[in-house]
Amino acid sequence: MSDAKQTKIDLGNLKAGGFIKERGKDLFTVRLRVPGGRMSVSRLKKIAQVAEKYGGEFVHLSVRQSIELINVNYKNFDFVVEELGEAAQKVASCGARVRVPVACGGCEYNPNGLVDSQKSALEVDEKLFGTTTGHHKFKVAFAGCPFDCPKSATNDIGFQGAIYPQLDMQACISCGLCAKSCVPKAIVTGEDNKPVFSDAPCIWCGDCVKVCPTSAWSEARRGYTVRIGGKWGRNPLVGTLFATFLPEDKVVDFIADVLEWYKLKAEGLGRIRLGDTIIKEGPQALLDHLRIRFPEFTVAETIAPQVIATQVGK
């Protein structure tokens, strides 16, 4: 029996890009799916065993939090999948599909976290991973706070945790901690030693709420700031603001709505990313689409994704 017949791996996975051809003859990289960058210790141990048995001398941790087994001979695909347990450890995806979402640790243990970015990433992975776009790759990232460690604005859709503060002046004891902790200077101390809040500089980090000893500062709104249209690569873009304080339970529906618009507007344009489609159509076209289902969260106006001129000075 030939090697080709012995290898029964689902070729759909191969075409989707979970198995990536390397330079070496008959060798592939097997990209494993790690939504949100989180994996149990027991699972990690099993992957290490399989990598040692069928791979090279190392594994690679991709920039999107996936684990890649290097130098896997295609003849061993069946064994790799069987020993990993495909149901528990599926391969990742490439091509014109929704990719594995990336995320920071969120609010479970990180003191800066404002939302459960891990929960959001797992939900998006479960419900939207592998969805075909018909045009190009589609990347999603979740940051638990405005520190934005996952660089969410350089993804097709980036979600960033946010809190909008409100002040009960009667509960304020004029301790000044809020003003001292406010790096963007959205809060300053007034003449009466009471805090004065300015909306424009506020980055919705919630630090004032965290440090207030009397709970005079509290959250008026909490959710995700949503930026759309980013990408990296040869011609990078930074995504721009399309929605604010989107509730965590509306993330999947919001992404699905953006995908719907993208599939329609990019029809016949070939391999075009979402950000370039927004630039072509104008950001108002996407805003109008989103406002139908998400009127209370969609911003009144925005700008197109911004080009990053990496070759300036050449």
Image (cartoon, rainbow, N blue to C red):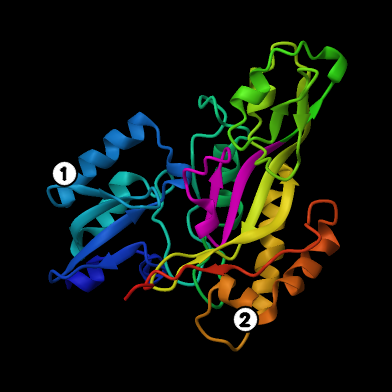
Q: Earlier in the sequence, mark 1 or mark 2?
A: 1
Camera sees residue 1: no
The residue sitting at 54% across, 56% down in the picture is 153
Taking depth in this image into account, of 249 and 26 the one nearest to the observer is 249
Q: Which mark is residue 266?
A: 2
Q: On the rendered image, what quadrant is the C terminus found in?
A: bottom left
Number of marks in the rendered image: 2
Q: Mark 1 = which residue?
A: 52
Q: Nearer the viewer, residue 107 or 56?
A: 107
Element type at marker 1?
Answer: helix
Q: Secondary structure at mark 2?
A: loop
Extent of the magenta region: 140-163
Side of 141 where 163 appears, left or right: right
- Look at label 1 and name its amino acid: Glu
Looking at this view, is 209 or 151 the one in front? 209
Q: Quadrant of residue 256?
A: bottom right
The kind of residue tagged 2 is Ala
Q: Is 89 situated left or right of 189 in this image? A: left
Tell me residue 159's x, y (percent): 61, 49
Tell me the quarter of the image containing the N terminus.
bottom left
Q: Quadrant of residue 162?
A: top right
- Would residue 314 be seen by someone viewing this image from the given angle? yes
> Could you tell me residue 224's position as x and y percent?
67, 45
Q: Is residue 309 magenta?
A: no
Compared across the picture, whether 217 is left or right of 123 comes to right
Residue 226, compared with residue 268, is above or below; it is above
- For the point 64% across and 70% down, the residue is 304
Q: As displayed, is residue 80 above or below residue 41?
A: below
Please tell me which residue is depicted at 53% across the width and 86% down the height of the picture: 270
Q: How far apart are labels 1 and 2 at the CA level?
A: 43 Å
